[in-house]
Amino acid sequence: MRLLAREASHKTAYRMNAVSRRTWQRMFAWKVERKEGGYLYFYPDPQRDFVRIHGVPDDEIVEVRVREVEGDEPESEYWGYVYAGKAEFEMIWPSLGQLDMCFPYGLKAAEESGDGQRVNLVIEEVRTVN
């Protein structure tokens, strides 16, 4: 899905960039180390305070970029939701099961009702924010 570039509300800290796919240029997330190596990112949001209200220490909050998986890229473990008529990713989780739990009747029912659609996402760390 290609979108024309547009500037988001001044109350939010992101811009839509439609050079290729929907992208949030600036978000913040809780960086959690995996036991098997690598990292997971939780609570991605344009507002740093949203991550903080979950009890995340400042030194574990990082800046990330979130974008849709493109064409021939492998499927990512991250999933989010885009409401019909909107361009912003919401309810971003590191598994489809966690996203599904956000809907009282399940993700499939929400999509079938025309409410919106799931999107497979990539989260890339930009830099550590202290």
Image (cartoon, rainbow, N blue to C red):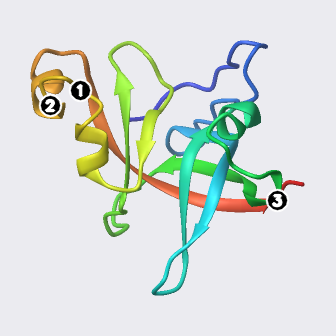
Q: Which of the labelled discs sits on residue 103, or is there none?
A: 1
121 displayed left or right of 72: right
Numbered disc 1: secondary structure: loop
Question: Tag 3: Cα neighbours inside 10 Å, few (<14), some, or many (≥20)?
Answer: few
> Disc 3 or disc 2, which is closer to the eye?
3
Tags 2 and 1 in contact by the CB under 8 Å rule?
A: yes
The local secondary structure at tag 3 comes to helix
Residue at mark 3 to residue at mark 2: CA–CA distance: 35 Å
- For the residues bearing labels 1 and 3, Cβ distance under 8 angstroms: no
Between 128 and 70, the one lying in front of the other is: 128
Residue pictured at 44% horizontal, 17% vertical: 86
Task: Tell which circle, 1 or 3, labels the residue nearer the N-terminal end.
Answer: 3
Which residue is label 2 attached to?
106
Q: What is the x, y in percent for residue 4?
A: 55, 25
Q: Is residue 10 left or right of residue 20?
A: right
Q: Secondary structure at mark 2?
A: loop
Mark 3, residue position? 59
Image: 9 above or below 116: above
Q: Earlier in the sequence, mark 3 or mark 2?
A: 3
Query: Label 1: few (<14), some or many (≥20) within 10 Å?
Result: few
Q: What's the residue type where badge 1 is placed?
A: Phe
Which amino acid type corresponds to the residue marked 3 in the rendered image?
Asp
Quarter location, residue 31: bottom right
The quadrant the C terminus occupies is: bottom right
Q: What's the residue at 70%, 29% (across, down)?
A: 15
